[in-house]
């Protein structure tokens, strides 16, 4: 028999018992209130009977964070969302944070098949294996380090996550010291936090897309990436400053920095090049799978051909084109510290990084009048991104062109 549970007075008059007091929400759908003792707050539960006759129940907790007068409406809204979710074929499985992370790793392994590792990646991972699944491996590693290391949080059902819980997780991650690289022991930068949050946000979103949870409200706002986290990349250093940086860096780092000053490549893409990527006879450089996932071939000017010929001299085709003293490829963990020292000796802005050279060379190409499509193709990015970050540099060129129209 239905009992009123929609008002505070009605609920306080209820006698404690194990069986919930139920009220009908719709055909086959009921919301219940369970009061075990006279002093308890009381918990809310829903039950659903589908067309197949199967019955399912779900607990929503006490809603203790809300005023007593608002708890019935909150519980009914949560129950309605669950009823709709089940009515559309959604899962009634209680999926935890840990389970959502595992499902996402499996999803990556199924949708992103194994692909060859670059020489740079093999050197960094200290492996001779040529096949791996970088995205799945990377996500799994981050989950183990930043999500599953908190057992209570990992065991939480997605349906019971709150913005406060996600916000606390994010705050803990932000204040955690980095474990490797040039910033080892320091608080995470905004860009590092964004990278660490990305797979977790994707795992939760996948669970929501697959109807394993009725709402993404808990994390929708709390896991938004930090805007302008990579603002340091907007730093521009001119040619004289680049020469000073190269001159204050020891070999073979100076050659690596010289290469970044000649071509608008991402540091990782330059580090991944092998001697076989350089065709001296035709003056071509084949840039392998870069961040954009596409291989591209660059026609080099005479000065660059001469430089790359010197770098490639006496090296076998499979060897990294730019090598560390140990004979292996550079990576961000190995170049960060030495570049920081060279920056200090050259008396350049302290936030100068390897990526600063890419930004500076792209800036020179755009300001020099090269069309944005060609700049994008050389740089391995989209015209939209070039316009977004460098379009303002066309202003002076436009002004000069308009000036030539004067009668």
Image (tube, grey):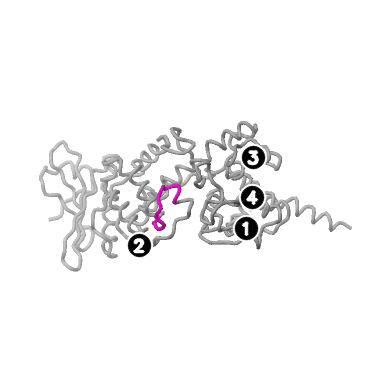
Magenta-colored span: 122-133
Report which residue position mark 2 lands on: 110
- Position of 296 compared to 117: left or right? right
Q: Earlier in the sequence, mark 4 or mark 2?
A: 2
Query: Which residue is disc 4 drawn over?
Result: 310
Q: Secondary structure at mark 4?
A: helix
Q: CA distance from mark 1 to mark 3?
A: 23 Å
In front here: 91 or 76? 91
Task: Provide the secondary structure element on which disc 2 rests.
Answer: helix
Residue 36 lies in the magenta-colored region: no
The furthest residue to the bottom: 51
Q: Residue at x 83, y 54 (%)?
A: 403
- Alpha carbon of mark 1 to alpha carbon of mark 2: how far? 32 Å
Residue 259: percent from left, percent from top: 62, 48
Nearer the observer: mark 1 or 3; the answer is 3
Of the image marks 1 and 2, the number of the one nearer the N terminus: 2
Dot 3 falls on a residue whose secondary structure is: helix
Mark closer to the chain start, 1 or 4: 4
User: In which quadrant of the rendered image does the N terminus lie?
Assistant: bottom left
Numbered label attached to residue 246: 3
Q: Are marks 3 and 2 in contact (CB under 8 Å)?
A: no
Residue at the disc numbered 1 = 378
Residue 115 image position (x, y, % from top left): 42, 60
Residue shown at 61% from the left, 53% from the top:
388
Between circles 4 and 3, the one closer to the viewer is 4
Which residue is found at the position 64% from the left and 45% from the top? Answer: 258
């Amino acid at each position: 028999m239905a009992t009123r549970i929609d008002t505070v007075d009605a609920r306080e008059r209820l006698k404690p018992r194990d069986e919930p007091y139920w009220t009908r929400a719709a055909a086959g759908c009921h919301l219940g209130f369970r009061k075990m003792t006279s002093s308890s707050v009381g918990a809310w539960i829903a039950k659903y009977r589908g067309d197949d006759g199967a019955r399912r129940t779900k607990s929503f907790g006490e809603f203790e964070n809300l005023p007593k007068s608002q708890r019935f409406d909150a519980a009914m809204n949560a129950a309605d969302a669950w009823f709709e979710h089940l009515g559309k074929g959604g899962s009634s499985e209680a999926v935890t944070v840990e389970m959502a992370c595992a499902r996402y790793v499996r999803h990556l392994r199924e949708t992103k098949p194994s692909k060859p590792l670059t020489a740079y990646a093999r050197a960094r991972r200290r492996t001779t294996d040529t096949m791996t699944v970088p995205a799945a491996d990377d996500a799994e590693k981050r989950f183990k380090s930043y999500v599953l290391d908190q057992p209570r949080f990992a065991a939480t059902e997605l349906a019971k996550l709150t913005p406060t819980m996600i916000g606390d997780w994010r705050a803990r991650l932000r204040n955690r010291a980095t474990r490797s690289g040039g910033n080892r022991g320091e608080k995470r930068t905004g860009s590092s936090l964004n990278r660490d949050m990305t797979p977790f946000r994707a795992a939760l979103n996948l669970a929501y897309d697959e109807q394993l949870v009725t709402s993404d409200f808990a994390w929708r706002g709390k896991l938004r990436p930090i805007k302008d986290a990579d603002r340091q990349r907007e730093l521009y250093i001119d040619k004289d400053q680049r020469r000073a940086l190269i001159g204050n860096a020891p070999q073979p780092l100076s050659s690596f920095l010289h290469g970044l000053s000649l071509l608008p490549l991402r540091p990782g893409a330059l580090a991944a090049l092998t001697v076989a990527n350089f065709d001296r006879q035709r003056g071509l450089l084949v840039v392998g799978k870069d961040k954009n996932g596409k291989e591209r071939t660059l026609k080099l000017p005479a000065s660059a051909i001469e430089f790359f010929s010197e770098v490639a001299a006496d090296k076998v085709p499979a060897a990294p084109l730019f090598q560390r003293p140990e004979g292996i490829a550079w990576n961000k963990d190995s170049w960060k510290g030495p570049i920081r020292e060279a920056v200090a000796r050259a008396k350049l802005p302290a936030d100068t990084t390897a990526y600063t050279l890419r930004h500076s060379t792209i800036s020179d190409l755009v300001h020099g009048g090269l069309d944005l499509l060609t700049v994008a193709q050389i740089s391995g990015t989209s015209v939209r991104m070039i316009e977004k970050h460098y379009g303002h540099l066309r202003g002076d060129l436009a002004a000069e062109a308009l000036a030539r129209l004067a009668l």
